[in-house]
Image (spheres, rainbow, N blue to C red):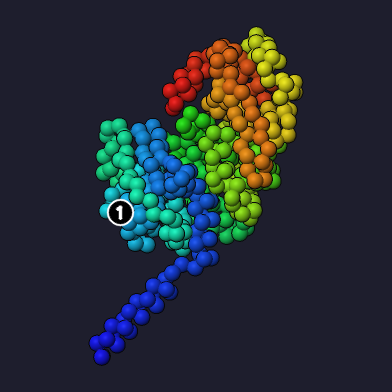
Amino acid sequence: MRTILAVIALCSAVAGAALAAEPSPELIAYGKALVEAGDCAGCHTADPAKPFAGGKRIDTPFGAIFAPNLTPDRDTGIGAWRDADFTRALRYGIAPDGSNYYPAFPYPYFTKMTKDDTLAIRAYLATLAPVASRNKPPELRWPFGYRGLMRLWNAMYFKPGLFEPDQSKSAAWNRGGYLVTGLGHCGACHTPKNYFGADRDAQALSGNEVGGWFAPRLDGAVRTGLKSWSEEDIAEYLQSGRNAKSHAGGPMAEVVVNSTAKMSDADVRAIAIYLKSLPSTRRETIVTPPDDAEMKAGQAVYAKLCIACHEADGSGAPRIYPPLPGNALLQSNNPSSTLRIILDGALTVTTPRAPNTGEMPGYAKQLSDDEIAAVTNYIRNSWGNAGLLVTPAQVARARKSQASGE
């Protein structure tokens, strides 16, 4: 009888401990909000019918990496991981078996997250339906496929450590800094990289090419950054995918739909407050305008194909066809995004706050490289704009890149 009672007592204690460890609905909801703020689905969902089951191809300058399975499947996902395994992976880029992750997984940013936040994320992921989906090995060029090199990379470029609040700033500013430099990992796209794929910290958030698109400056640059944007402009852009100055496109449109449109008003406002406080991290290039012949050639194309939607003065239609005067992305030194839109066209991103849509046709088949270069130079250097000269050779490269799916 004593043995039976002892067993019952032990089972009760174990059950009680399990119940006590069960995450609360509030914690799970908070974890979901963090997952959305971090846009985890953007990389870890290849098939919308199998969210977070991984398999999505991520192309890098060194080859391709495939995002792993984050569902609680015990064999192919993270169901068998301990809390410590998850925290170490997220904040230090180390797998449960001790191997190193590649920094396409943004642990250099996630290292700034608190332990409580990492465990809240884990609590939410544990509620997902388990999906049996084995992780695909990376397809990297030699010698980058040797994971041992990551130890050297980490020693040179990885700076582990929590986000350090600035006590001289407001709570909202610090929250924005935590989201931008940590959980939101904005610099993963918007900060220039060195030869080895590490951030150029001295040029933080000053723009970077990603997957054939240009992620524009988020610093205080006057012409190509956010100097002319208000906090309200930034918040509206993040929540609706558009504002009176610009529209989200390419990878940023996905970020808006999957992430920022779902964030709380307070968090979006905090991001805006933080970004508006940033100075310009590098000088803007002095631009020599195109000659008259180039501008006239571009104006002819614009009058024929663009003026109906964008108007003679480039003003467009509010929040349907973006304005061209003062457009920071349009004036960026890197014209990749502009060329992609002219070649392939664009569809206005739709969100609950901005459900209406607008569409621009692509002109890859209708216009020559010379014509696209001319109209690009015209809109980059009219109405007070100033953008570096785009050559037909650049258009040809963009055309070839898009045709190959790069």
**Other-residue count near label 1 (Cα within 10 Å), few / some / many at <14 / 14–19 / ≥20:** few
In the rendered image, which quarter contains the N terminus?
bottom left
> Residue at the top extreme?
293
Taking the image as shown, residue 154 lies to the left or right of residue 311, namely left
* Quarter-of-image position of residue 139: top left
The residue located at (39%, 72%) in the rendering is: 18
Q: Amino acid at mark 1?
A: Asp
How many labels, in total? 1
Q: Nearer the viewer, residue 313 or 24?
A: 24
* Quarter-of-image position of residue 126: bottom left
Residue 258 point in image, percent of width and height:
54, 45
The residue located at (63%, 43%) in the rendering is: 351
Can the viewer see residue 88?
no
Residue 42 point in image, percent of width and height:
48, 43
* Quarter-of-image position of residue 257: top right
The residue located at (31%, 83%) in the rendering is: 8
Work out whether 116 lies above or below 380. below
Taking the image as shown, residue 126 lies to the left or right of residue 94, namely right
Residue that numbered label 1 is attached to: 75
Work out whether 229 lies above or below 86. above
In the rendered image, which quarter contains the C terminus?
top left
Work out whether 76 lies above or below 225. below
Residue 3 point in image, percent of width and height:
24, 87
Q: Nearer the viewer, residue 404 or 334?
A: 404
The residue located at (53%, 61%) in the rendering is: 29
Work out whether 371 lies above or below 120. above
Can the viewer see residue 358?
yes
Q: Nearer the viewer, residue 78 or 104?
A: 78
SS of the residue at dot 1?
A: loop
